[in-house]
Each structure stands twice: as C-alpha cells, then as structure tokens.
C-alpha cells in the first residue's frame, strides 16, 4: 500500500512539474479575433475553402538567435497541432534557436517577405511558388523553420546543395530529429530541389 501511495505521489509531482516547466505552450481553436487578423492579413482570403474549424492556434515559447527567451504563435491544421506544440516544447527545452515565430499575416501573407525576415510560419492559403498547385501550407500541414538560414537549393547549385549558414538544418540537428520522430517529411530529402526549412505531414499523429 505504501509503495502504491509513493508511486502515485511521485507521478502527481512529475505531472505538476512538467506542466509548470512547459507553461506558455497551448493549442486552441481559431477565435473570431484571430480569424479577423487572418482575413485582414491575407492568409485566409474570403474564398478560402479550408474551414476555420480545421485550423488551430498554437502558442509557443522559444529562444531567439541572441539566446533570449521569447514567445511566438502560428496557425496550423488540427491534425498536426498537438505535435507542433510538443516539438516546440522539445526545442525550447534544448535551447534550440529560432529567430521568430509569427503569423505570416504580419508580413501581408507574403511568403518571400516572411522568409527574408527568417520567420517561422505554417498556415497560409497559397499555391506552391511558380505553380497552380496548392501548397501544403494552404492546408496548414507544413511549417518552415528559420527559412533564411535554410533556403531552397537546387542540387547542382554552385557550392553544393547544403547552405552554408549558421543554423542550417541537417540530419544531426535537434529540429530534424524532433520532426522526423513524429512522422514529418523533410524538404531536405527531396530530389528535384532541397527545401531545408520545410517539414510537412498529411495525416494524424504518427511516430516512426
């Protein structure tokens, strides 16, 4: 009996400690105020066929490039929202540097402007650049991490396919490992081009 009571107490304290340590991370439905921001900002146009009920507002904490703790937010599909929260928790505890995590609406839903600012973002109803095909970002099933440090590169580009930037993602990187173990695919594995910033997943919670 004493052993069971001790174990119950230990589990309770572990749960409390975990909750306190990870305060500031949340997943919520898209509120009316947020929906208005997305419409005004351009990521959710009036004719967008993706129901707002399919999307989630994820708030996180992270460390910026100067090593300072800050907060961020993104919108993504409900199918990957809990895993994105868990990934950002893992990266926060590892002190992994992320420049900023802001809605792409802060940049007028302009992907180029968001990337130039090295901003991490997820949902934006748009096509794949240069095509008429919807991007995974249009369904909120993809996220770009530190895009200025992890640009798109063609394999035959002079100097090789791997960008020479301070925070480039590779297979030994904590960010890569956090996404891959939750079933995300990585643009750095693509053949026609390498999109080092890009992670996507088209289904529910997975582990590999």
Image: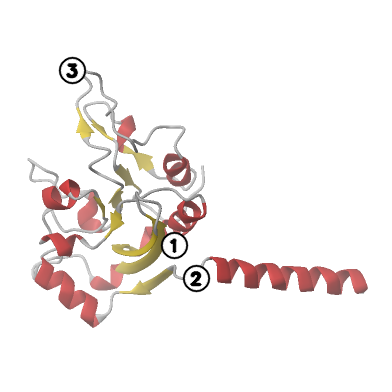
The x, y position of residue 180, in whole percent, is 45, 42
Residue placed under numbered mark 3 in the picture: 158
Front-most of 155 and 139? 155
Q: Are marks 2 and 1 in contact (CB under 8 Å)?
A: no
Mark 1 lies on residue: 82
Circle 2 is placed at which residue position?
23
**Residue at image location 12% in from the left, 48% down from the top:** 112
Q: Is residue 31 left or right of residue 106?
A: right
* Dot 2 or dot 1, earlier in sequence: 2
Q: CA distance from mark 1 to mark 3?
A: 39 Å
Q: Position of residue 142 (x, y in %)?
A: 29, 51
- Whole-Å distance between the Cαs marked 2 and 3? 45 Å
Which residue does the image show at 29% across and 68% down from the upper left?
Answer: 54
Q: Position of residue 203 (x, y in %)?
A: 38, 53
Which quadrant holds the N terminus?
Answer: bottom right
Who comes first in sequence, dot 2 or dot 3?
A: 2
Q: Residue 19 versus residue 86: which sits nearer the camera?
A: 19
The mark closer to the camera, 2 or 1, is: 2
* Mark 2 neighbour density, 10 Å: few (under 14) some (14–19) many (20 or more): few
Disc assigned to residue 143: none
Q: Nearer the viewer, residue 148 or 74?
A: 148
* Distance (Cα) linking label 2 and label 1: 15 Å
């Amino acid at each position: 009996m004493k052993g069971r009571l001790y174990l119950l107490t230990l589990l309770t304290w572990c749960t409390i400690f975990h909750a306190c340590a990870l305060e500031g991370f949340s997943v919520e439905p898209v509120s009316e105020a947020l929906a208005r921001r997305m419409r005004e900002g351009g990521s959710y146009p009036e004719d967008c066929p993706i129901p707002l009920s399919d999307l989630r507002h994820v708030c996180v904490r992270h460390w910026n490039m100067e090593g300072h703790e800050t907060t961020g937010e993104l919108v993504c599909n409900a199918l990957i929202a809990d895993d994105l929260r868990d990934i950002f928790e893992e990266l926060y505890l590892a002190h992994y540097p992320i420049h900023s995590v802001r809605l792409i609406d802060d940049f007028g839903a302009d992907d180029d402007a968001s990337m130039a600012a090295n901003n991490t973002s997820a949902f934006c109803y748009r096509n794949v650049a240069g095509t008429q095909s919807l991007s995974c970002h249009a369904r909120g099933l993809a996220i770009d991490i530190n895009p200025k440090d992890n640009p798109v590169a063609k394999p035959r580009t002079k100097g090789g396919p791997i960008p020479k930037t301070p925070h480039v993602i590779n297979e030994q990187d904590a960010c890569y490992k956090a996404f891959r173990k939750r079933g995300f695919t990585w643009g750095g594995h693509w053949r026609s081009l390498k999109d080092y910033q890009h992670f996507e997943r088209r289904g529910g919670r997975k582990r590999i």
